[in-house]
Amino acid sequence: MPPDTLSGSPESDVTSAMTFKDTELTLGIPGEPTRSPAGKFCTKRGFIETVDLNLRTSTSKPRGKAHADEVDDKSDDVVSGTCKTTASKTQVVGWPPVRSYRKKALESCKYVKVAVDGAPYLRKVDLETYNSYQELLMALEKMFTCFKIRGNYLDESKVIDPMKEMEYVPTYEDKDGDWMLVGDVPWKMFIESCKRIRLMKSSEAVGLAPRTPPRCTTTT
Amino acid sequence: MREERTEMSKDDDRSPPLDLRGADIAESSSKTRNCVTGSGHVTGLNPTEFQAPYPDQVLENVLENVLQFLTSRRDRNAASLVCKSWCRVEALTRSELFIGNCYSVSPKRATARFSRVRAVAIKGRPRFADFNLMPPEWGAHFAPWVAALGSAYPWLEKVYLKRMSVTDEDLKYLAENFPSFKELVLVCCDGFGTRGLAVIAKKCRQLRVLDLIESEVAESDMDWIGEFPESGITCLESLIFDCVESPINFEALERLVIRSPSLKKLRLNRFVSIGQLYRLMVRAPQLTHLGTGSFSLAEGVAHGDQEPDYESAFAACKSLVCLSGFREITPDYLSAIYAVCANLTSLNLSYANINAEQLKTVIVHCHKLQTFWVLDSICDEGLQAAAATCKDLRELRVFPIDAREDSEGPVSEVGLQAISEGCRKLQSILYFCQHMTNAAVIAMSNNCPDLEVFRLCIMGRHRPDHVTGEPMDEGFGAIVKNCKKLTRLAVSGLLTDQAFSYIGRYGKLVRTLSVAFAGNSDLGLKYVLEGCPRLQKLEIRDSPFGDAALRSGLHHYYNMRFLWMSSCRLSPPGCREIARALPRLVVEVIRDEVGMIRAECEEHIDDAFDILYMYRSLEGPRDDAPSFVTILH
């Protein structure tokens, strides 16, 4: 049964839980409805995932099972009802049915190699651990401590390596096999399409278009 | 083996009478049991020596000679039901023992009935346990079995285990107690590590097969490859360790391969670089099955530094029919395999993150391909290319590179449609996607009449046909209706009870059914339990089926291997009712940790448990159940 057609309507659960909800911490101003039209909820999502704090609810499975068919009459926990309407990051245990062995193996697929012109060996980074270009480039700087990287991001600081007086331009190879300048596309799109990274000597990067003014999306 | 035959008659304490084997005594062949070949050689017997046989003795001898040719266990099971005599003789001639559920029968009972077993296969955990739906430590321990096998079958040669917990001690026991031990295959097993492997390598002098498939191998520093005997030719035919997540001693492996001229199957783990692969391939051009390891350069090796000629190494392997691995592939190297593509019947690229263009360069050569496993990174376009070339395809599996409900979903109904049109001989498909249409599924049901296995996983829960907005009922309905050979089905997407009505009506040969987030009411499950007489394995999660539905299967549960239902609408009283009605059914109710805490705090427990797992058994409740398992009675 699709989650929308329950035997008990979500509204009745909400009203029965009114008093509890009123005192519940939210991220919005007290008194505002906890559900925005878009269905996002304002309570701290981390609550759901905590195992021992779900004692009062038999519906919300702390592992994130969002199947609302198991609402029972004493569901005080609106959180479980809103589970299904939140942004999709709440994953359900064991779904899709892919073995953890395979998932792990493919994760290391997501590590990308980082080469720096002039360095004798490569490094590998997991792009998923960063949230923005800034974070990534700072991490790369730390990895290759001898080199400073010119970044196409907000502060636009062009840093020169004191030892070798060279700039490095971060480039990457995308899914189609083309070499691109890091920073043009939104971060999410970048991590989905980046196959490997090369920090190219500026001198070799002659011919690439001058840096475009950074868009705010590049840092999300 | 002739000696074995006379031994059996001696056990019966009667001298061999009318000897139907007489004609063939002179003939020796490599076949283990040689007997009547229809020559009707009565003239070979001296009439004065003729002893009137007891009728059953004749029958049993005849039976022995005949039944030994039965290899299919289904045939053997049928034969054993004819009468006691047949049962006895069948038990004497069964050399391969298959236990589909390790708790359905005890090791003692199994070994008491079958006295001459040389190969054992045992399956343990239910499949849904693979997806973290059950706490670990549930059971399925190999230990009690290995002990019983040790005393009953000292001549044991082969062990195949699936979803069992095997410890290093168990492996040690195997290595030390079975001098003829030849084959060990562990599929989706856990509980052991490289220490156990080391003992096997060291002590099993007759080892032909050591296959570790999708098993979890605990890491340690143990150099197990180095434990294989250092000198002399080995009889190794198959060495599969691609799931071992720790580095291996490559030099020892290379020496091993050099000393193993019979080696046909070699599947390396991701810690073997392409350079090392090369070195092994030139030593073993006789390989038929190859798992290529990482298929990229070792860390620290730069591209282009005097690289060996990978293409020629592949070209030299003229017998290669099965290729897998590519665990950390550098796509540039794909061209190395072109030379062997034309001979390949099986290609597993399901760990290789390659795009459509890269796939096309390979698949265009693979005319003989029958089995193809791949990642959805190849997109619909890649599937279209496969459909255009692989006209002989029997099995396709498309795995998601990003296994989340909200991921992009690079393959869709377009790819499925293309496959159905290009690969008419398809027998088995596993397809992960985000978007699907009934039309494409119906097309496949019409285009691929040989389908036996249809597993479609639409990753977004409750997702309808994305073009019409309708439930996926009609698509799956067409599959069960048109694919007359269908034995295994996995459904997904938005499904109403109607879909189950179709399955019950048309799925007469279905043995395995997997259901998740589907159906409206008890009716759904009822249709299936009442309609599918061949149903043996039923696994359901997060679907609104309750006690009434469970009751409707009472007539059938003894015919099934197991039923799994998790996060459905069952209640403890409902399950208890089943346990009471069917005493030979073990009804396990499994709680997750949270369920246990809840149970302590709440007086009134609605869904007090997460999982119902029930199975027929001759032994009653098992004695190794952990605390989170309750067995109802």
Image (cartoon, coloured by chain):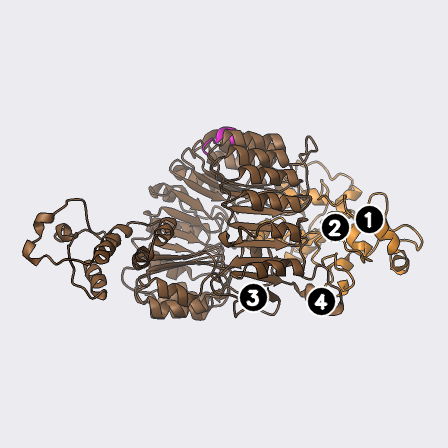
The reply to the same-chain question for discs 4 and 2 is no
Chain B's colour is brown
Q: Judge whether residue B164 is colored magenta.
A: no
Percent position of residue B234, x then y: 30, 59
Query: Which sits in the foreground, B277 or B319?
Result: B319
Residues at marks 2 and 1 touching, judged by CB atoms closer than 8 Å: yes
Residues at marks 4 and 2 touching, judged by CB atoms closer than 8 Å: no
Question: On the image, numbered disc 4 is attached to which residue?
Answer: B599
Discs 3/2, front: 2
Query: Which sits in the foreground, B208 or B451?
Result: B451
At x 71%, y 57%, the residue is A61
Question: On the image, numbered disc 1 is attached to which residue?
Answer: A10
Instruction: Look at the image and give the residue range highlighted in magenta.
Output: B419-425
Q: Amino acid at mark 2?
A: Ala
Distance CA(mark 2)–CA(mark 1): 10 Å
Looking at the rendered structure, the secondary structure element under dot 2 is helix
The reply to the same-chain question for discs 4 and 1 is no
Percent position of residue B587, x then y: 57, 61
Question: On the image, numbered disc 3 is attached to which residue?
Answer: B137
Query: Which sits in the foreground, B568 or B53?
Result: B53
Q: Residues within 10 Å of mark 4 (few under 14, many from 20)?
A: some
Q: Amino acid at mark 1?
A: Pro
Q: Amino acid at mark 4?
A: Ala
Distance CA(mark 3)–CA(mark 1): 38 Å
Discs 3/1, front: 1
Question: On the image, numbered disc 2 is attached to which residue?
Answer: A68
Discs 4/2, front: 4
Q: Is residue A98 visible?
A: no
